[in-house]
Image (tube, helix red, strand yellow):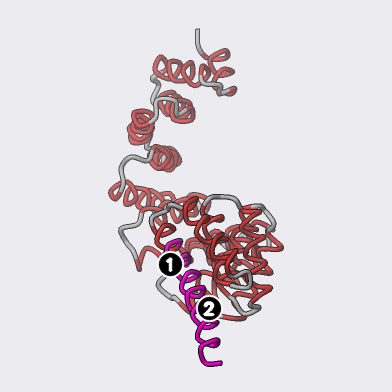
Amino acid sequence: MKKLLLVLFIPWVCYGQTVDEFLLSGKEKADLRAHAEAIVDFTKAIELAPENADAYYFRGYSEYKSRDYNKAIEDLSKTVALDVDYSSAYFRRGLSKFKLRDYTGAIEDFTRTIELTPDVVAYINRGSAKTKLKDYRGTIADLSLALELDPENTGVYISRGNAKLKLKDTAGALDDYTKVIVLSPEKPDAYIKRGNIQVTLKEYNSAIADFSKAIEIKSDNADVFYKRGLAKTKLEDYKGAITDYTESIMLDSTYTYGYSERGIARENIEDFEGACEDWRKAASLGHYASAQWVKDSCN
């Protein structure tokens, strides 16, 4: 009898080790981004152990990374059917649904993830899904919860500021962008976003200061030079505006609005020939108003 038990026991040990080996091999390949090969290993593990939740999860993970979102959802659904508390599977399935624009389904999965393991990334992604559904108040609520867990996450402040802008909460958005600047003064995006708000508030000097700081940090963004030029135009600093519009055009020779606005600035300093030259270029790039200005004002 003991001999029979030993015979029965040894294959079971080998079986378990074989599944583990396939899982380990698959994980190693996934770490190297060899997801097609990883999927082969995870499939072999599933064939040997069809009730192994981990095998389905890791295959679903590699399918997600391979952008095969429907297959990922199928495997991750199998994972949570085998283990209803598998929070990573709900999260990854939520990401897959998000990619397929099933935002309601994604929210459900991120919510289940949060119920099991409250996590900054889950709150952020649920907030992103709510943004897609234009539930900006819901977005703000989720991002605020994320900030309670990670109060120095600058990306979350940026996203929450964006959501506040959608609700026309300009003061709240300014506060969030300013918080980013305090936490990470070397990041240009917050300066640009705060500068945009300053323009809408007609605080042009403040806007110029923010755009200038953004340019100091990263000087290859044609949009920022253009926006600073617009603010200078509002202050009737036409020569300064022309310099900025010229910079935007040097960075992007097809920057239509750079030509059209430089033309306006040149007209204001009575450089009519230069204005017409700019408007002709803008018109050639498809700017209708410039074409009309050429017709009305240029020979």
Front residue of this view, candidates 59 and 260: 59
What residue do we see at 51% from left, 88% from top?
3
Front residue of this view, candidates 279 and 97: 97
The magenta stretch is: 1-26
- Residue 24: mark in rendering: 1
Main SS of the magenta part reads helix
Front residue of this view, candidates 60 and 268: 60
Q: Is residue 271 above or below residue 147?
A: above
Say whether residue 119 is left or right of residue 191: right
Picture coordinates of residue 234 (x, y %)?
A: 45, 41
Taking the magenta stretch, the answer to whether it contains residue 24 is yes
Quarter assignment of residue 239:
top left
Query: Which quadrant: the N terminus?
Result: bottom right
Quarter assignment of residue 124:
bottom right
Taking the magenta stretch, the answer to whether it contains residue 195 is no
Check disc 1: other Cα within 10 Å, few if <14, some if 14-19, many if 20+: some
Amino acid at dot 2 = Trp
- Which residue of the protein is positioned furthest toward the top in this rendering? 299
- What is the CA distance from the residue labelled 1 to the residue labelled 2? 18 Å
Say whether residue 152 is left or right of residue 125: left
SS at mark 2 in the image: helix
Quarter assignment of residue 136:
bottom right
Provide the residue designation for mark 2.
Answer: 12
Q: Say which label, 1 or 2, has the lower sequence index.
A: 2
Picture coordinates of residue 64 (x, y %)?
A: 56, 56
Say whether residue 242 is left or right of residue 43: left
Q: How many marks?
A: 2
Amino acid at dot 1 = Leu
Picture coordinates of residue 259 (x, y %)?
A: 44, 25
Check disc 2: other Cα within 10 Å, few if <14, some if 14-19, many if 20+: few
What residue do we see at 30% from left, 58% from top?
186
